[in-house]
Amino acid sequence: EPHICEQISLVPAQKNYCDNHPKIMVRVRDGAQTAISECQFQFKNDRWNCSTADKRQVFGKVLQRVIKKNIFVNAKVNREAAFAHAITSAAVTYEVTRACSRGHLIECSCDGRKRGSSKDNTGKFEWGGCSDDVQFGMSVAEEFIDANEIAQHDGRAIMNLHNNRAGRKTVKAFKKRKCKCHGATDTCPLRTCWEELDEFRLTGNYLKRKYDGAVRVTVRQGSREMTLHTTVSSHKPPTKRDLVYLEDSPNYCIRSEATGSLGTSGRECNLTSKGIDGCALLCCGRGHDTSRVTRTRKCNCRFHFCCEIRCKLCTETLDVYTCK
């Protein structure tokens, strides 16, 4: 897709990378879409639900907002910005890595470092199959996504770089080893093993927990570079996989162009929940409307040999509650 690089405004380093690696850029786009979908899943019951990004957009506007403004929160430096940068960097790492293993890119393939003999708690095994080369995926995300922050070199950039790295490191942490036995299955005299990335949902779940416990920091100018410090001196400094932010978030109750908030008016809420998805909290005290709706859903699903699942369509009428 040679037109990809012309659809978005890039800093020189990104433009050069895009021109030289158009096929990889397709996977960067896939990562942007994965990031949007995962963010919307993780925050579907929160006041901020990533709704400023439209997952139906395929490339231009989505990636433009990923690179220049971030997908969800423009140029803010709050918790939401921290999560957005981390999940974007993580998703690009993930999609590029998986594309390598599937043979979709000529620049990479399987992890050549996973060769020879090794051992684990079960015993000895031989590396075989196709292990995911997560280091290549991380290097792409670092070189391309971080380039915009490096070009800025201010407090916001230092924060974003930290969260970008946290996202990449989280993906790397969720690897799983798969093995195949050769010979008698009860004794498994020889095992061939490979490593692959676990489902991306685990990365999203972990980063959501890190969002909940994100560390507020300040940026200080040292003799050589700017560094991050916790706002409370007695607190431990953030780890490499912690998310950090510089400013508190707005409450996201009302629509505001200044904060990038769409507000919660019109959002469906849970009347009986006492959590953030409940009408009391999600609607910010404005109250809610009740409407009677009829919905159709799949039901009475059964497995038919072989290999099909057949379902009936059931109609149900229920009350739906939406914030005023």
Image (tube, helix red, strand yellow):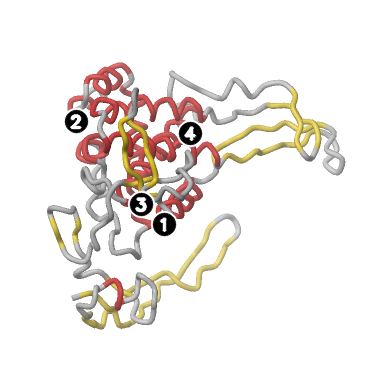
The label on residue 8 is 2
First of labels 4, 1 by sequence position: 4
Label 1 packing within 10 angstroms: few (<14), some (14-19), many (20+): few
The spot of residue 51 in percent (x, y) is: 25, 55
In the image, what residue occupies the spot 52% across and 36% down? 172
Tell me the distance, in whole angstroms, between the alpha carbons under discs 4 and 2. Answer: 24 Å
Q: Which residue is mark 3?
A: 39
Q: Nearer the viewer, mark 4 or mark 3?
A: 3
Q: Quadrant of the C terminus?
A: bottom left
Q: Judging from the image, what secondary structure is the residue with disc 3 in?
A: helix
Task: In this rendered view, identify the residue nearer to me: 265 or 216.
Answer: 216
First of labels 4, 2 by sequence position: 2
Q: Which residue is mark 4?
A: 98
Name the amino acid type tagged 4: Arg
Taking 208 as reference, is 275 above or below it?
A: below
First of labels 4, 3 by sequence position: 3
Q: Nearer the viewer, mark 4 or mark 1?
A: 1
Question: How many marks overall?
Answer: 4
Q: Which residue is mark 1?
A: 212
Name the amino acid type tagged 3: Cys
Taking 149 as reference, is 323 above or below it?
A: below
Q: Nearer the viewer, mark 4 or mark 2?
A: 2
The spot of residue 22 in percent (x, y) is: 31, 22
Tell me the distance, in whole angstroms, between the alpha carbons under discs 4 and 1. Answer: 28 Å
Name the amino acid type tagged 1: Asp
